[in-house]
């Protein structure tokens, strides 16, 4: 099994994906253990002093003015975890919880939190045992970080609350820890707070969304190329010299991908002989501009994620010179903004894909294709309602594109009077990414049928490879009406699992 070693300088996106989705084993580096021990010595020294230090010998948030006596500090740390584990609603996905825990472990190992090495080791042990705390949909305002979700994870480390075992069954966390020989953590000064104060949930969801969207943007380039072929459009608008004079990197990459897929096609360029059509519609002609802008948005979001993956997010933090200082680094604004930005780009990509699908189905705009790509129009409805489904998904994408980060709701008796709503931005982006995969799947279904209905004209080798692979995966071709939902489900899996891109790349080589 793959092993990810966590040091003091952060982790990579591939590390997060390996642990969250691949079940990779987690280990702490010797450097991290030493940093943990050194920071703990600083916290212990401060705890022994009579002067109050926030998070070490005081209450939290609006209750920070109370100095806590030594005999009550362990209870204080337990209580903050128990009281903050206040989430409600449906359970969050297993991969999200694993990313959440792993990224919190990343910050612990930075040596800036002041927890003991055994706390970090216990978190790694829980991940390695395949134990997943039950975390709920609602509870985080994104400041101070993802408090409620992280509290449910910390509760599991204490042997309390519920968790899912490696067999998928939810049971009391204490039973699961005992079965795997993991001793519950007895929290000491600063440790409860250090387990809760971070942007780890929203960051984990950002990292996974970036990975999914990298594949979906390539998929969208492929389906746009198939639609262009089915509509007998021109590939001249994809020429590199046209995109070089407007040098947005994503636009150039998207155009290059479409051009690679269309290489050798006999279906492109026929509209030059069709007098009423001087040029293709925007949804075809401007596909690289829209997809390219989204790609550039991905690049910006990836930069923010990389910075956050290298960060130590906690409050207060232990500094190398021995100070323990309060700060605002837990605020989720940097992550929240790009999560919302991605949701906007996703909505627009889904919207332009739906417009191409609608054009393929309209006999007045499809340049010779049968109405709704039906076998016997009137007797058969063809893909009429598949486009309805796609349109419903696009409409939801538009609602999901409304930014969460533009909102703020004061909490903690106005101590936390401006919050990021980054968790909410991440949750809606996950829904948007799933919907985008379905929208691309419907375009694939329609475009591949349109290409096959152009009898006597040979598609590009890459297009043919995609269609052949789709048919082998259960995505059916033209014919009389049939139960359509299973076909669309097969198309969705073909897209979501990466098979669409893989089929194209067998001919084109790696797409950008």
Image (cartoon, rainbow, N blue to C red):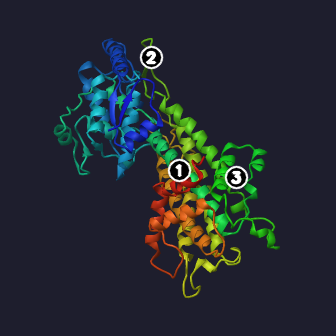
| Inter-mark Cα distance, 2 to 1 | 40 Å
Mark 3–mark 2 CB contact (< 8 Å): no
Q: Position of residue 411 (x, y in %)?
A: 45, 39
Number of other residues with Cα within 10 Å of mark 3, as a class: few under 14, some 14 to 19, many 20 or more: many
| Inter-mark Cα distance, 3 to 1 | 18 Å
Mark 3–mark 1 CB contact (< 8 Å): no
The residue labelled by disc 3 is 289
Q: Nearer the viewer, mark 2 or mark 1?
A: 1
In the foreground, 426 or 356: 356
The residue labelled by disc 2 is 319
Residue at the location (48% across, 25% down)? 327
Q: Position of residue 55 (x, y in %)?
A: 37, 24
Q: In this view of the protein, can residue 190 be seen by the observer?
A: yes
177 with respect to 3 (left or right): left
The residue labelled by disc 1 is 215
For residue 415, above or below residue 488: above
Secondary structure type for disc 1 = helix
Q: Position of residue 396 (x, y in %)?
A: 54, 61
State the image quarter where residue 474 is shown: bottom left
């Amino acid at each position: 099994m793959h092993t990810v070693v966590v040091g003091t300088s952060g982790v990579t996106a591939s590390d997060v994906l390996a642990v969250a989705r691949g079940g990779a084993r987690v280990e702490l580096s010797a450097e991290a253990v030493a940093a943990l021990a050194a920071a703990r010595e600083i916290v212990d020294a401060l705890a022994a002093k009579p002067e109050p230090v926030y998070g070490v010998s005081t209450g939290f948030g609006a209750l920070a003015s109370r100095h806590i006596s030594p005999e009550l500090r362990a209870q204080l740390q337990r209580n903050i975890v128990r009281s903050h584990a206040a989430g409600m609603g449906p359970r969050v996905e297993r991969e999200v919880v694993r990313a959440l825990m792993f990224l919190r472990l990343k910050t612990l190992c930075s040596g800036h939190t002041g927890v003991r090495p055994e706390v970090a080791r216990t978190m790694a042990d829980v991940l390695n045992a395949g134990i997943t705390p039950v975390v709920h949909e609602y509870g985080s305002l994104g400041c101070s970080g993802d408090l409620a979700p992280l509290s449910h994870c910390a509760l599991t480390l204490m042997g309390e609350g519920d968790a899912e075992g490696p067999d998928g069954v939810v049971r009391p966390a204490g039973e699961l820890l005992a079965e795997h020989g993991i001793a519950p953590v007895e929290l000491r000064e600063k440790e409860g707070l250090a387990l809760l104060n971070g942007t780890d949930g929203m960051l984990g969801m950002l990292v996974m969304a970036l990975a999914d969207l990298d594949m979906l943007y390539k998929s969208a380039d492929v389906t746009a190329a198939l639609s262009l072929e089915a509509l007998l459009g021109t590939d001249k608008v994809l020429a590199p010299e046209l995109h070089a004079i407007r040098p947005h990197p994503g636009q150039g990459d998207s155009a290059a991908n479409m051009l690679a897929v269309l290489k050798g096609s006999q279906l492109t360029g026929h509209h030059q002989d069709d007098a009423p059509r001087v040029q293709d519609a925007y949804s075809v002609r401007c596909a690289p501009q829209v997809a390219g802008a989204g790609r550039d948005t991905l690049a910006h979001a990836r930069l923010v994620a990389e910075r956050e993956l290298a960060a130590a997010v906690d409050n207060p933090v232990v500094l190398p010179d021995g100070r323990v200082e309060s700060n605002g680094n837990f605020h989720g604004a940097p992550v929240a903004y790009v999560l919302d930005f991605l949701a906007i780009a996703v909505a627009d990509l889904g919207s332009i894909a739906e417009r191409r699908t609608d054009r393929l189905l309209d006999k007045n705009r499809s340049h010779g294709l049968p109405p709704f790509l039906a076998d016997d129009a009137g007797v058969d409805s063809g893909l009429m309602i598949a486009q309805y489904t796609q349109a419903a998904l696009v409409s939801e994408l538009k609602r999901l594109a409304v930014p969460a980060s533009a909102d703020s709701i004061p909490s903690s008796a106005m101590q936390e009077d401006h919050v990021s709503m980054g968790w909410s931005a991440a949750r809606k982006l996950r829904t948007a990414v799933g919907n985008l995969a379905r929208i691309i799947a419907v375009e694939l279904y329609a475009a591949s049928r349109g290409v096959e209905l152009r009898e006597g004209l040979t598609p590009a080798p890459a297009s043919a490879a995609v269609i052949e692979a789709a048919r082998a995966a259960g995505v059916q071709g033209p014919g009389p009406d049939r139960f359509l939902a299973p076909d669309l489900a097969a198309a969705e899996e073909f897209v979501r699992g990466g098979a669409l891109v893989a089929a194209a790349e067998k001919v084109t080589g790696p797409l950008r």
